[in-house]
Amino acid sequence: MSNLQISIKGKSFDPGRIFCIGKNYGEHIKELGGQTPEEPVVFMKPVSNIVAPGETLSMPRHGNLLHHEVEVVLLIGREGQDISESNALSYISGVTLGLDLTLRDIQLQLKKKGLPWELSKSFEQSAPLGHFKAYDSQSIDLQNLSFSCSVNGELRQQGNTRDMLFPVKSLIHTLSGWWTLKPGDIVFTGTPAGVGPLKAGDRVDIESPATGSFSWTLGT
Ligand code: ZN
């Protein structure tokens, strides 16, 4: 999907980087037995891992426990560094949902050894991503956005962005202190509780009243 183009109100964006935030919901930290971070936990996925809605996902070959993590995803619309929280929302052009697919068995091994997370988070097709909807603060409240994930019609995750430990404004502020944010950058904002395994043949649906719904099927 290297030729993936994102279009918002007639303006097109080349996807730049995918920033992912870990441990941003208290109940999810509890279910994995982790510690509450003092600043946002950031990792990245390559843009080539994006999978458009409706495409078939393949089970990764190097792990066994493939977990769904539904997340609200932001599209950065303009360049910025050291962005203040009060200006942060004006840097966002689009919003959608995505799946931060995770090989949990591999991640546990890597965590134990103190190794980087790429094998568990950045494998092929690890970033199923919905279509971006134009963001404007009048019609979408990013800090009160409900969203969910179902597998084969059974509700697995239900979240609301008001439960974020680091709200969107804070994430943009912090990320822009560490990197120069650029148009086309994408931010996965963390997953609520209820993560769980997927198996071949499963159908995953993610949805929010603010973004619509998107689905993927797992092949073998
Ligand atoms: Zn995640």
Image: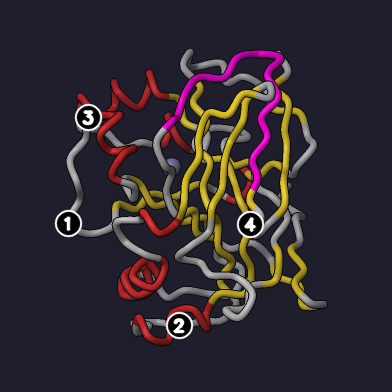
**Residue that appears at 72% across and 52% down:** 212
* Element class at badge 1: loop
**Residue that appears at 64% across and 40% down:** 206
* 175 relative to 184 in the view: left or right: left
Q: CA distance from mark 3 to mark 4?
A: 28 Å
Determine which quarter of the picture holds residue 108: top left
Of the residues tagged 1 and 2, which is closer to the observer?
1
Amino acid found under the numbered disc labelled 3: Gly
Q: CA distance from mark 1 to mark 3?
A: 16 Å
Q: Which residue is mark 2?
A: 80
List x then y, in percent, for residue 140: 60, 70
The quadrant of the rendering that contains the C terminus is top right
- The mark nearer the N terminus, 3 or 2, is 3
Range of magenta residues: 194-207
Q: Are marks 1 and 3 in contact (CB under 8 Å)?
A: no
Q: Which residue is mark 3?
A: 33
Q: Which residue is mark 4?
A: 96
- The mark nearer the N terminus, 1 or 3, is 3
Q: Which residue is mark 1?
A: 38
Amino acid found under the numbered disc labelled 2: Gly
Amino acid found under the numbered disc labelled 1: Glu
